[in-house]
Image (cartoon, rainbow, N blue to C red):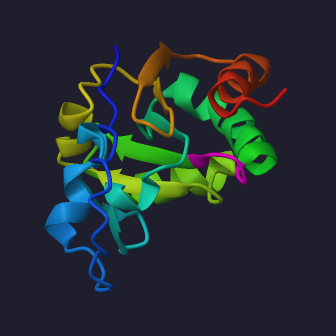
Amino acid sequence: SEVAGSSAPPPSTGVAAPSAAPSEGSRLRGLPALLKFEAETLDGKSFTGANLAERPVVFWFWAPWCPKCAAEGPAVAKVAEKYGDRAAFVGVAGLDKNKDAMREFVRRTGTGGLTQLDDRGGELYRHFEVVEQTTYIFMTRDGKTSRDTGPLSESDLTGHVEALTGSA
């Protein structure tokens, strides 16, 4: 499914813009709808989707009890390590109420290098309209998205990320 990107900036009026930083409200107006969220990481830090603006993003939705998610974890970690300078990688841990199980999954799969969001309440699964794990959402700089469901091999995931980032 496609998500509309932000519109082009208005034509210049020749009047200098104020030097003050834009307000949070104005900054969010041009933000793709899918990046309008706030969450907490598995290590308890605040996270906002606005931090991902204007970057390619790979969202990986997983559950700690999911065997195919666990099998994919090492490949996700390898691809994120290889392409992390060209795209943001964000794990979304959901479909479970046990935060300790989520942390153990991250440890066991070697995916601690990714930002891992705590979605025990399912808000992000609903926001992104994810109905199964393992799901990947690939978002371009301008907010267009594509999806795939796993299991994805390291090669399959690499293909998606190379298409997303324009690198081969």
Is residue 116 on the magenta stretch? no
Q: Which residues are magenta?
A: 84-88
Taking the image as shown, residue 168 lies to the left or right of residue 64, namely right
Q: Tell me where residue 89 appears, x and y as whole percent.
A: 57, 47
Question: Main structural element of the magenta stretch: helix, strand or loop?
Answer: loop
Quarter holding the C terminus is top right
| Quarter assignment of residue 13 | bottom left
> Depth check: 140 or 134 in front?
140
Q: Tell me where residue 51 appears, x and y as whole percent.
A: 41, 62
Q: Residue at x 45, y 18 (%)?
A: 147
Residue at the limit of the structure toward the front, as seen here: 14
Taking the image as shown, residue 146 lies to the left or right of residue 80, namely left
Residue at the limit of the structure toward the right, as seen here: 168
Q: Relative to 50, does residue 17 appear above or below in the rendering? A: below
Q: Residue at x 40, y 61 (%)?
A: 100
Q: Tell me where residue 132 appears, x and y as whole percent.
A: 34, 20
Number of numbered discs: 0
Q: Residue at x 28, y 86 (%)?
A: 20
> Depth check: 142 or 86 in front?
142
Quarter holding the N terminus is top left
Taking the image as shown, residue 25 lies to the left or right of residue 132, namely left
| Quarter assignment of residue 114 | bottom right
Q: Residue at x 44, y 41 (%)?
A: 64
